[in-house]
Image (cartoon, grey):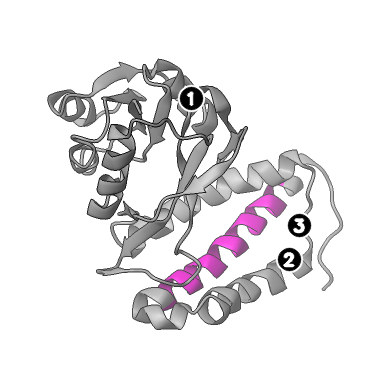
Amino acid sequence: MDISAVIITYNEERNIEAALASLEGVVSEAVVVDSFSTDATPRIAKKRGARVVQRRWTNYADQKNYANGLAAGPWILSLDADERLSPELREELAVLKTSFKEPDCAGFSIPRRVFYLGRWIRHSGWYPDRRVRLFRKEAALWEGDYVHESLVVAGRIERLKGDLHHYTYHDIADHLDRINTFSGLGAQKLYAKRVKCRAARLIFLPPARFLKSYFLKLGFLDGFPGLVISALNAYAVFVRYAKLREIWKKGERIEPFPD
């Protein structure tokens, strides 16, 4: 099983070395498509033995599809720069890599565990967060024009047990910064679908999201980080729809909120 690892980057000098180090001995090559980082990301990636290609940013799906096209192997392991293979996952992939029998599936889903505010998150809707990250090159395509790209795979998906470790937000401020970025992209996606923002969405959806994350998804078992996750999940929903309303107000006239 010949596996090529693929990573897209922009200013990931804090993460890229550890991500590439976790791949050593598991993949045949590592391909990094960098969007002209202004930090040391390309240099570090080359030092770790990755093949680095520079490409102007388009969007997540297009960038990942381009990166997949550069991979030499028939199997692709798609990794984000802030992710690492756990020892258990490395062992599973090593077994697949050395197996004499080719897997008869199109891809594998992998559970992803997040490290946030000093602890591993086991609830809050953030775990197991399975993602198809190992797949046949010719059987998969990333789709999505704005944010939260999705992988469409033609064929059966099997499951791996080892976790993919995700070192997502450095702190609460970083979390808020990314909510600001992704809520804007999310609002644009909704606007492209001609979804309108009514008062009910701003009033009821955020608290519903908090209750779901903190109670239904057992976020309270994650301690203080679980509370923060649940609160910021609610905030992210509010900001996304508030930005959607802002876009509509700029683009065309809609019904005003009741006084």
The verdict on residue 234 being magenta is yes
Residue at which label 3 appears:
197
Type of the residue with mark 2? Arg
Secondary element at tag 1: helix
The correct choice, above or below, for 119 with respect to 46 in the image is: below
Quarter that holds the N terminus: top left
Picture residue at 64% right of the left edge, 48% below the top = 187
- The answer to which quarter of the image holds residue 71 is top left
Contact between labelled residues 2 and 3, with CB atoms less than 8 Å apart: yes
Type of the residue with mark 3? Cys
Which residue ends up furthest to the left in the rendered image?
A: 47
Q: Is residue 250 visible?
A: no
- Label 3, residues with CA under 10 Å away: few <14, some 14-19, many ≥20: many
Image coordinates for residue 138, horizontal then vertical, percent: 53, 22
Residues in magenta, as a range:
227-247
Image coordinates for residue 89, horizontal then vertical, percent: 30, 50
Residue 164 located left or right of residue 204: left
Picture residue at 42% right of the left edge, 22% below the top = 74
Residue 201: give its label: 2
Secondary element at tag 2: helix
Image coordinates for residue 210, horizontal then vertical, percent: 56, 75
Which residue ends up furthest to the right in the rendered image?
A: 255
Residue at which label 1 appears:
137
Decide which of tag 3 and tag 1 comes sooner along the chain: 1
Discs 1/2, front: 1
Residue 120: give its label: none
Picture residue at 62% right of the left edge, 70% below the top = 206
- Label 2, residues with CA under 10 Å away: few <14, some 14-19, many ≥20: some
The verdict on residue 162 being magenta is no
Residue 246 located left or right of residue 40: right
Q: Nearer the viewer, residue 157 or 239?
A: 157
Q: Is residue 177 visible?
A: yes
